[in-house]
Image (cartoon, helix red, strand yellow):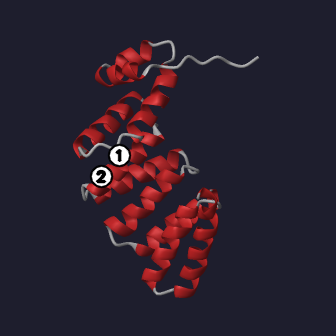
Amino acid sequence: PALHVPRVAAGDLAEALEDPERVEHHAGARIARVELAHDTHATFDRDGAGRANRRERALEIDPQNVFALSGLAGVRLAEGRNDEAIGAATRAVDLDPTNLAARNTLARAFWMGKGLIDEGIAALERARAHNPDAGYVFQQLALLRAIKGDLATAEIEGERAVALQEGFK
């Protein structure tokens, strides 16, 4: 028989942000934390401080929330707080080495935030090892290889990115 897992209503998630203890006492507490992570990861408002606050509050509820850490890293990168972005993304990758979003954010924090192209390439190569069909990884690798002047490899990476992303038309 299938396992029934209760879902938590979106309103409950919003209230949980204001009262983290409420989520702990809810019958679906673990599910609430997971859905809260997805909720904070998927929020695209223009208020960077609001996005950061929601992710930080999600981390108070679940300090090992990879989605919230990855999202916080992206916000910190956008704010120019590059060391904090690298720290949050590194922690997310340590918690879930297969998480493509966290690995991509880490790579962007290295090369966009700090100008560390080689570290960005290394982070993307590790992402590719875990997610060999992720076209975005190949796209970013092509860009960084071109910046480094390795145009032959950039072309190969770019062709692979296009081939992988053609299925999403």
The image shows residue 32, relative to residue 67, as above or below, that is: above
Q: Residue 43 appears in which quarter of the rendering?
A: top left
Would you name the residue on which mark 2 appears?
A: 76
Q: Position of residue 156 (x, y in %)?
A: 61, 79
Disc 2: CA contacts within 10 A as few (<14), some (14-19) or many (>=20):
many
Q: Is residue 63 visible?
A: no
- State the mark number for residue 72: 1
| 34 relative to 44 in the view: left or right | right
For the residue marked with disc 1, what is the amino acid?
Answer: Leu
For the residue marked with disc 2, what is the amino acid?
Answer: Arg
Count all numbered tags in the image, as a single digit.
2
> Residue most toward the right?
1
Q: Position of residue 143 (x, y in %)?
A: 46, 75
Which type of secondary structure does the marked residue at label 2 adopt? helix
| 68 relative to 3 in the view: left or right | left
Which type of secondary structure does the marked residue at label 1 adopt? helix
Tags 1 and 2 in contact by the CB under 8 Å rule?
yes
Q: Residue 38 appears in which quarter of the rendering?
A: top left
Q: Nearer the viewer, residue 110 or 74?
A: 74
Q: Residue at x 51, y 17 (%)?
A: 28
Q: Position of residue 98 (x, y in %)?
A: 58, 50
Q: Nearer the viewer, residue 94 or 2?
A: 2
Q: Is residue 153 visible?
A: yes
- State the mark number for residue 156: none
Disc 1: CA contacts within 10 A as few (<14), some (14-19) or many (>=20):
many
Q: Quadrant of the C terminus?
A: bottom right
| 67 relative to 84 in the view: left or right | right
Q: Position of residue 69 (x, y in %)?
A: 40, 44
Q: CA distance from mark 1 to mark 2?
A: 6 Å
Q: Residue at x 29, y 41 (%)?
A: 51
